[in-house]
Amino acid sequence: MIRSLSLDRAGVDAARYPFSVPAIRSLTTLELHPQVTLLAGENGSGKSTLVEAIAVAAGFNPEGGSRNMRVATRESHSSLHQHLKLVRDPRPQNDGWFLRSESFYNLATYVEQLGDVSGYGNVPLHEQSHGESFLTLALERFWGEGLYILDEPEAALSVRGQMALMRRMHELCADGSQFVVSTHSPVLLAYPEARIYVLGDDGIVETPYRETEQYELTRLFLDDRERFLRHLFDASEATPDSGARHTEQVTIELAAARGVKTSSDT
Amino acid sequence: MASTPTAPFLRALTFQGTADDYSDALPALREIERIELHPRVTFLVGENGSGKSTLVEALVVALKLNPEGGSRSYQLAFSTRSSHSRLHRRLGLERCGLPPRNSFFLRAESVFNLASVVEAEGREMHDVFERPLHEQSHGESFLDVAVNRLAPNGLYVLDEPEAALSLRGQLALMQRVHQLVAQDCQFVIATHSPILLGYPDAWILELSDDGVHRIEYDEAPQVELTRAFLDDPERFFRHLLA
């Protein structure tokens, strides 16, 4: 189990990836919640990089899997883990998994190789969707007193599936487990008794649930999507040749959509 | 111009006979005969295990796209899924007009697959991706593919594209879909996301035990549930974690 982590910058070239990513650049010490730490942030904010580094520093192999799996078939994406110092807490750790975001798509094959899995909802595993395979793993292969590091586990899950996952997390935490989870989901982020860190241009900032963009914007969208989308699409029509409309451009329109909403409320 | 292929390319999916595998037992698809598609954007929704992805994969096989993601011209020789079903044996396509100029099947893992193929073949990464992949997040490379490889006059099948994307990423993808719809494209999109589903001028088809039925945005389970959840997460947790 991990109490906190800190970044030792000795010998680090701050201009090099991933140390150049704003969230990592400003990282000194990060206290983890004894049960659930949630990492949020944009695509490219360094979430997955940080999650992988924590996992590797904690003894998992970069490939992902359980802690007993010693076959490393891939290199870590970054050298961040070499500079990460973990402060452990004294709770016993008898189980652990690290799941990379791409592993959620390989789980059926993978869990099948483990054998002895009855299957989520009694459906044979190779007939299960990605989401069901993952729930099977969490229900039948996560045993408690474990360190579970999950990179965007909502990837293949329906909203209902995410709720099933949170129920399982709650059980496992009661059994002395700790989770470190990166997520985009406004549903998973709501997990009570958790600490949320948002990775962004301002570094890594602890943020209350209702102040996260995921919560705020999803509600805004669900409340009045026509207005929200009119804004978004008008903006993209105004600049029809900007094929590569990546997330930075969207920011501006989101601000506008927020403004529209607020002004109509007052 | 008469020779320009324009959407709709697919009017409907039709079903006949049996597939002789597990897909025959999926309640949503068991008695289905015909699924009419929206001329521009059709969403498929349903629980994990409802048969959404199975249907999408069958469509992709019928269209002769690679079921692991990618385009016709970029066949991928390996698999992240042990097998897709044989549902395509039952599936017929009601096509209309000229065939699309371009077609592509995109799912979150396609990006991992594409990256591996490109690496294995020693092809230059910039042929496929705008920036070096190891410096891009999964979501960024996914958007890269959506922006650079989906072209006008195309037919596109997307399977849970939100899996790789942040909220902003999903909005960026919606903008891209909006542009491409204006450029005579047609989309079939399976999704869990209440955001993507909000795309206007689309049909939402729900796969459930009762078959496949068209529903309104506000009736979609992910919309109802997310809305209720965000209105009062504490109430949900009192029940969920009791």
Image: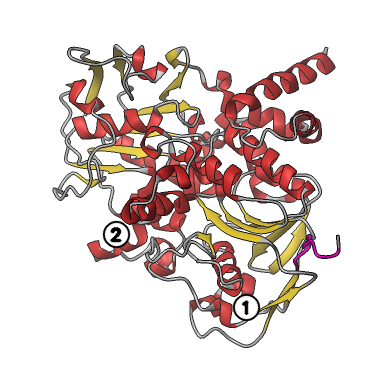
Can I make out residue B242 in this image? no
Residue found at x 29% / y 59%: A110
Q: Position of residue B180 (x, y in %)?
A: 72, 47
Q: Chain of mark 2?
A: A
Q: Secondary structure at mark 2?
A: helix
Query: Is the residue B154 above or below the residue A182 in the image?
Result: below
Q: Nearer the viewer, residue B216 or B160?
A: B160
Query: Is the stretch drawn in magenta largely helix, strand or loop?
Result: loop
Residue found at x 26% / y 16%: A13
Q: Position of residue B8 (x, y in %)?
A: 78, 63
Quarter of the image for residue B171 reads top right
User: Nearer the viewer's eye, disc 1 or disc 2?
Assistant: 2
Q: Position of residue A177 (x, y in %)?
A: 27, 35
Kind of residue at disc 2: Tyr
Quarter of the image for residue B232 reads top right
Say few, some or many: other residues with alpha carbon within 10 Å of mark 1 (under 14 / 14 to 19 / 20 or more).
some
Q: Which residues are magenta?
A: B2-10
Can I make out residue A173 in this image? yes
Q: Which residue is mark 1?
A: B30
Q: CA distance from mark 1 to mark 2?
A: 29 Å
Kind of residue at disc 1: Arg
Quarter of the image for residue A175 reads top left
Q: Chain of mark 1?
A: B
Query: Is the residue B94 above or below the residue B197 in the image?
Result: below
Q: Nearer the viewer, residue A56 or A189?
A: A56
Q: Position of residue A15 (x, y in %)?
A: 33, 16
Tell me, what colour scheme is on the image? secondary structure
Q: Which residue is mark 2?
A: A110
Q: Nearer the viewer, residue A261 or B67?
A: B67
Instruction: Give residue A199's mark.
Output: none
Specify whether residue A209 is painted magenta: no
Placement of the N terminus of chain B among the 4 image quadrants: bottom right
